[in-house]
Amino acid sequence: MRDVRKIVFILAVGFLLPWMPEQAHGQYKQPQVGPSTPLSGVQYNYRWEFYGGFAYAHLTAGPQLKVGSNLGGFDADVSRFFRQRWALQGSVRGYYGTSGAAPNPYGIKGPFVNEYLFVAGPEWRGPSNEHITTTAHAMFGGAWGRFESALQDQNNNKVPPQAVGFYPNQMAFGSVLGGTVDLNRSPNLAFRISPDAILTNYSSSYISGSRLKADFGISVGLVYRRGRGQVR
């Protein structure tokens, strides 16, 4: 009789167990944890920002040229933040390529030219979140244009720049007005797109005066930030 009772008891427990709440029979349920993201620690309270990238700029190498040239090069910037929204930014840029020339008897058609910019000025941080940040900057300084390095005739004699419609080599006023869009990859690293207007006022001896000219430039590259938690 006792064996019969044990069998009935075991069958009853086996029948009722699936209907009991999960807490009653101790089933473990894994807690729900929100997905982690590498951008959760992004804060704009760092002191320094370093940028390096590939650059493009449009350049007109002379006052008599109707068509400008497309140059490629580099862009290297550093920013020192004194507040979360305000910094002092400095930039060194170099652009290299070939330019069309005015009709000439020397056989010069596409000589090499290059330009360097050395500028600095204020930078202001605009709307930002953990994914993206924007800035605007206005930098001023000098532009070093090298237009004569490839001006030789078939006998390697130097050809004056005015003979092909070029400016002479010179240091002139230069300015960069524009901004940046940074796509954050981590709290310290971001991918940057930086479009700008590049202003220069090259002059020539055969055309009186100089004129301020605006060209388009853009660069893409990486930003590295350091000195976190040191700026309010």
Image: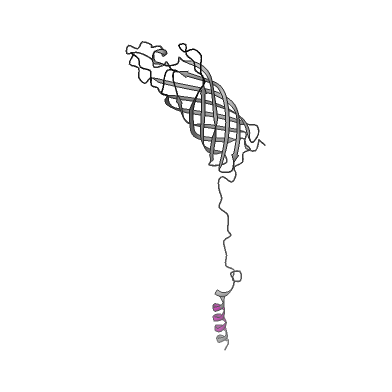
Front in this rendered view, residue 106 or 11:
106
**Residue 101 x %, y %:** 38, 19
User: Can residue 9 be found in the magenta stretch?
Assistant: yes
Residue furthest to the right: 232
Q: Residue at x 39, y 15 (%)?
A: 164
Give the vertical position of 20 relative to 116 (above or below). Answer: below
Picture quarter containing residue 70?
A: top left
Say which of 114 and 63 sits in front. Answer: 63
Q: Quadrant where the C terminus lies?
A: top right
Q: 215 or 130, which lies in front? A: 215
The residue shown at (55%, 74%) is 18
Residue 59, position as x, y percentages in the image: 45, 24
Point out the stretch of residues depicted in magenta. 6-15
Instruction: Give x and y (percent) for residue 76.
Output: 52, 28
| Secondary structure predominantly adopted by residues drawn in magenta | helix
**Residue visible at 56% across and 81% down in the picture:** 12
Name the spot of residue 144 as percent of width and height, x first.
Answer: 50, 19
Establish if 4 lies above or below 66: below
Seen in the image, is 163 located left or right of residue 75?
left
**Figure label count:** 0
Q: Residue furthest bottom?
A: 1
Query: In the displayed structure, does residue 146 sit left or right of residue 105?
Result: right
Q: Quadrant of residue 111?
A: top left
Vertical side of 89 occupied by 132: above or below: below
- Render colour scheme: one colour
**Which quadrant, please, contains the N terminus?**
bottom right
Look at the image and say whether residue 45 sits in the magenta stretch: no
